[in-house]
Each structure stands twice: as C-alpha cells, then as structure tokens.
Image (cartoon, rainbow, N blue to C red):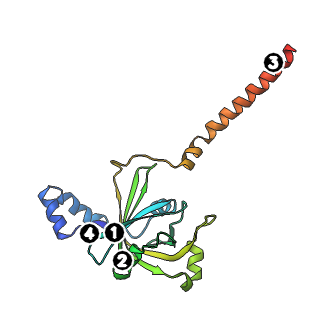
Amino acid sequence: MNYHELAFTESIKKIQENNGSRSGYARMENTSFVDGLTEHEISFISNQDSFYMATCGENEYPYVQHRGGPPGFVKVIDNDTIGIVDFVGNRQYISVGNLSKNPKVAIIMVSYPDRARLKIYAEAEIVELKDNDDLFELLKPEDYKFRPERMMIFKIKAYDWNCPQHITPRYTVQQINEAFADQKKYVSDLEEQIKVLKEALSRKKE
C-alpha cells in the first residue's frame, strides 16, 4: 500500500512542483509503503462510531455520505479488509447506485477527541444479506437496535494519516460522562458524608 503513489496523479504532481512541495512528497512516495493495516489502524477503526464515504456517480459528480452506528460498528476482517452492515436509511440509494457502476471509494474516519484523521482508498463490494449468514454474524453490531439492508465490504488499497491541524476536539455525551465519572462519585461521596455529619450534629443539639 502506497497512499501517495495512488493519490498523486500527474496533474497533482505538477501543482506540487509549481508550489515547491514536490521534492518532499517524492521522497514520501519512495518510503511510505505499508503492508496492510497495523495494530494502530485496527484499534482506531474498531472504535469509530461514524465515517464519511465518497463515491462517484454516473453524472461524474462525487457524492459524500455519512455512515454511523455504535462504536465498533466498522469491523476489521483482516489487515486489508473492513466491513459494515448497511442499515436501512432514507432509501435514496445514491451510494449503492454509484457503487454498482464504480466500486472505488474514499473514506475518512475522524476521532475528534484524539484530533486524528485516517484517509482510506478502497474498493467496495455489496453483499446481500441472504448470500452470507456467516459474514452477517461477524459484522452485525451487538446490543444495538437496527434494521439491516445489506452489507458492505471494503478492500483497502491505501491509507494515510492526516495532521491534526484544524480538528476541533469534540466529545459525545457518553465520553463526557465517562471522563467525569470519578469526579461525580467524589462529589456524591462528599454529599453523603455531609448528610451524615449534619444528622449527627442535629442529634447532638437535641
């Protein structure tokens, strides 16, 4: 996998050359080969609760769609394959229709708390639910209410990490609750101690 070699077309290289960044990226092309996902990417992907996917339509316009679910709804099948259960949505089927003509996709996954962004080039395959029960058992989210419509498998061709610049840290309600759990318990314990002391003081006054 070499993200830069795949991403940098001749026109892009020309623009880089005109803007003085070509030599640096040329070195990256020669040294950035990666043999599949590492443990770092696998951990990152396995904890995501959403991603953005771009497909290309017959009208030659790209289409970007948000995909979401519970943390871990994106499953890592092996070190160059990930997959999801595609939930029933608004039934426009734009992404699915685009993929029926062109399987190439670009995916961006963002962790706002960590200010981390993973870019992925992949080829997608639509798998119908009736065609592979074992795959559905592997991909389905646990303890999550959903209506499945199909499955999507993504064969990763290349990936790269973006810099954290301009990623504003954001946190879910669950993440905030977890971060303040110890503090809430500490306050609760103090309140209980104050209550006990007040009751003891009240008895002494009687």
**Considering only order in the chain, which callout, 4 or 2, is on the residue closer to the N terminus?**
4
Q: In the picture provided, is 18 more to the left or to the right than 82?
A: left
Q: What type is the residue that disc 2 sits on?
A: Asn
* Secondary structure type for disc 1: strand
Q: Which residue is mark 3?
A: 201
Q: Which residue is mark 1?
A: 63
Residue 98 is tagged as: 2
Identity of the residue furthest to the bottom in this view: 131
Which numbered mark, 2 or 4, is in the foreground of this view? 2
Identity of the residue furthest to the top in this view: 205
Q: Which residue is mark 4?
A: 5
Q: Mark 2 and mark 1 in contact? Answer it, CB < 8 Å.
A: yes
Q: CA distance from mark 2 to mark 1?
A: 9 Å
Q: In the picture provided, is 57 more to the left or to the right than 65?
A: left
Q: What type is the residue that disc 4 sits on?
A: Glu
**Considering only order in the chain, which callout, 4 or 3, is on the residue closer to the N terminus?**
4
* Secondary structure type for disc 2: helix
